[in-house]
Amino acid sequence: MKPKSRIKMDPEADSHLRIGFIGAGNMAFGIAKGIISGNVLPANIKVSAPSKRNFGRFQEIGITGTNSNVELVCGSDIVFVAVKPHLVRDVLNGISAYITDRHIVVSVAAGVTLETLQELLPENTSVIRMMPNLPCIVQEGALLFTRGSCAKPADGVLLRSLLQHCGLVEEGPEAWIDIHTGLSGSGVAFVYLFAEALAEGAIKMGMPSSLAHMIASQTVLGAGRVLRESGKHPAQLRSEVCTPGGTTIYGLHTLEQGGVRASTMSAVESATERARQLGQKSTARK
C-alpha cells in the first residue's frame, strides 16, 4: 500500500489545509470559528447542508456554503462530519466513493463508534472520533478525540493544532468518549440548571431577576476560571471560601442535605450510560 499523502507539520502547515464541515449547526460553527482564530483562512473552509438556512453566520465570518457534500469532500483535506447521529450513515454512504488517502475524516456525532465509521468509509481511511461541547462557540470548549486504527499520531497532532483555539483539546481511548459526553457534553446543561437555581434563590430573597441571572452567570464563569487557572482540587478551593460559622458553610450544608453531590454524580452516570446505548445502536445497525 502506498504511503498516505499528508501535509507535513510546520508552522505554516495549517494555513494550507482545506477544511470542510458537513452540517451547519452550532458545533460546526463553533469549531470553524476556533480554527480561523489560528492560521487557517476562512477562504479555505467550506460548509455543506441541505438548505441555506444556517449559512448566514458562516458567511459573516468569510466561510462559503454549498448544498453538495460531494463538492465539499472533493475540495477538502479534512472533513468534519457534524450532523445528527441518525444521519451519519446516509451521509457517509453518499461521500464514501469520494474519500481518498489524502483525507482525514473527523466525526463529532454523539454515540457513533469508530467501528461504525470505519465500516462505512473506504478501507484504510484515517478516521478520528471527537466529542466537543457547546462552549466551543465561544472558544471555551472541552474536546476529547480518539484516533481510528488507520489514523497516525501525526493526524492527532494536526487536529490538536487546528483546534487549539477552541478550548481544551485532549486525546484518549474511545472508552472515554462516552464518559466525556456525560461529563462535559451533558454537563454544560447541568451547570446551566445550577446557575438557574442560584439566580432563583436570589430572586426568592428579593433580588431583581435580570440582576440575579447576570450575577449567577458571572459567578459560574469566575469560579470556572479560578478552578482552571489555579490548578487546585475543587475541594481545596471550596474549603478556602468557607469560614467557620460563615454563610458558605451553612449553604453547603443545605446543598449536602439535598443530595446535590450524589445527584450530580448520578446525572453524569446516566448521561454516560445513554451515550453508550446510542453507541451500541449505531454498531448494531450494519
Image (tube, grey):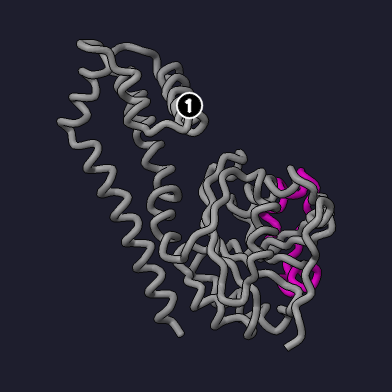
Q: Is residue 112 magenta?
A: no
Q: Is residue 40 left or right of residue 205?
A: right
| Residue at position x 72%, y 59% in the image | 47
Mark 1, residue position = 226
- Answer whether residue 64 is visible to the viewer in this image: no
Of residues 203 and 15, the one nearer the viewer is 15
Q: What's the residue at 27%, 13% (across, down)?
A: 243
Between residues 106 and 204, which one lies in front from this camera angle? 106
- Location of the N terminus by quadrant is bottom right
What element does badge 1 sit on?
A: helix
> Hey, which residue is sitting farthest bottom in the picture?
1
Q: Is residue 220 left or right of residue 146?
A: left
In percent of width and height, residue 212 lies at 40, 19
Q: Residue 208's quadrant in the figure?
A: top left
Q: Label 1 neighbourhood size at 10 Å, few (<14), some (14-19), many (20+)?
A: few
**Is residue 72 visible to us here?**
yes
Q: In the rendered picture of this protein, how many numbered marks are placed on residues?
A: 1
Task: Give the amino acid type for the residue marked by disc 1 in the picture.
Answer: Val
Which residue shows up at 65% across the image and 50% down it?
163
Magenta residues, as a range? 51-75
Q: Is residue 17 above or below residue 209?
A: below
Left or right: 42 with respect to 128? right
Q: Is residue 30 left or right of residue 171?
A: right
Q: Where's residue 25, x and y in %?
A: 60, 54
Residue 223 position by quadrant: top left
Give the quadrant of residue 111: bottom left
State whether residue 69 is above or below residue 260: below
Residue 256, position as x, y percentages in the image: 19, 31
The residue under the point 68% across, 78% down is: 95
- Magenta segment: does it hold 55? yes
